[in-house]
Structure formats: C-alpha cells, structure tokens
Amino acid sequence: MKKIIIYSFLFISLGAGFSSCGKYEEGPNFTLLSKKARITNTWKFTAQTQNGIDVTPDPMSYSLTMTLKKDGTFDADYTIFSQSFTSSGSWAFSDDKEDLILSDATGVQISEILKLTKSELKVSNIQNGDEIVTTYTAQ
C-alpha cells in the first residue's frame, strides 16, 4: 500500500511538472532545451501578419536574417528594395522570459514571444494599436 501511495505521488508530481512546462502561447509544451539554447540561432524572416491578416512582403523586396549569439549580442542583415543594411546590438529575455528585448543604436524593441522552438521563433509587437506577428525560421 505504501508503494502505491509513493508511486501515485510521484506520478501526480511529474504530471503537474510536465503540464506547467509550456511558457509560450503556441508552444512548445515541453522541451529539454533551455530557452537560451533554443533562441541562440540564425533566424530568417518568413512571415508577418497585422491583426491576423497576412502582410508578408515579397521576398524579392525584403529579407532579414538575424543571428542571436550566446554572449547576448546579435547581428542583423536586411535588404529593402535591393538596399542592404546591417545592425548589431544586444539581446536579452525579460525577467519572466516571456519577452525578447533587442537593443541597438536606434533604440530598444520589446517583443512578446509566442512560440520558441529550435526551428521556429514567433513574436508579437503592438505598433500604432495593431498587433504585428512576425515569424522566423532557423537557418
């Protein structure tokens, strides 16, 4: 009987632990990789919505590749209508790790993380009252 109570307690404890692992709205629900291990990657812009409507620019006129490094720095290369630009700065999580904070010479951008897997990053910003959701895939 004592073994049944112990195993029941362990099973309930593990179940509660697994159910509380999902931090982001769209997942993942469980992963063995830390948030830092998942976010440090080279990310390529793939899609964008504004208030739920697809507003992804034509890849021929806009591209963005951003590398988030383990040391807390980032580099970004982007092209707008055949003009190339670069940016660099620092990145960090908010204290609760629900937001991604990018800081460069132009200022600070805080984005709510909706999804963070090793292969996909989805963030949300509010701009002029509109929700902008941007999706990146790992390179």
Image (cartoon, rainbow, N blue to C red):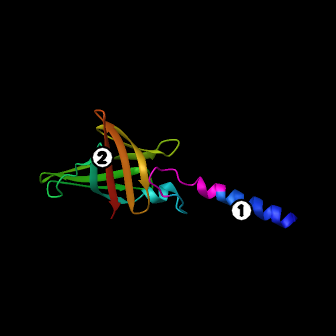
The answer to which of 130 and 100 lies nearer the viewer is 130
Q: CA distance from mark 2 to mark 1?
A: 40 Å
**Mark 2, other Cα within 10 Å: few <14 / some 14–19 / many ≥20:** few
Vertical arrangement, residue 59 with respect to residue 100, above or below? below
Q: Looking at the picture, how far across and down is residue 91, in whole percent?
A: 41, 47
Q: Is residue 12 left or right of residue 29?
A: right
Quadrant of residue 130 within the rendered picture:
top left
Quadrant of residue 45 within the rendered picture:
bottom left
From which residue to which does the magenta span run? 16-28
Vertical arrangement, residue 70 with respect to residue 104, above or below? below
Disc 1: which residue: 11
Residue at 74% x, 61% y: name it: 10
Q: Which corner quadrant holds the N terminus?
A: bottom right
Reply yes or no: does residue 69 show up in magenta: no
SS for callout 2: loop
Disc 2: which residue: 52
Q: Which amino acid type is shown beneath numbered disc 2?
A: Gly
SS for callout 1: helix
Q: Earlier in the sequence, mark 2 or mark 1?
A: 1
Task: State the residue lying farthest toward the left.
Answer: 82
Q: Looking at the picture, how far across and down is residue 129, in whole percent?
A: 30, 33
Q: Is residue 36 left or right of residue 49?
A: right
Vertical arrangement, residue 29 with respect to residue 125, above or below? below
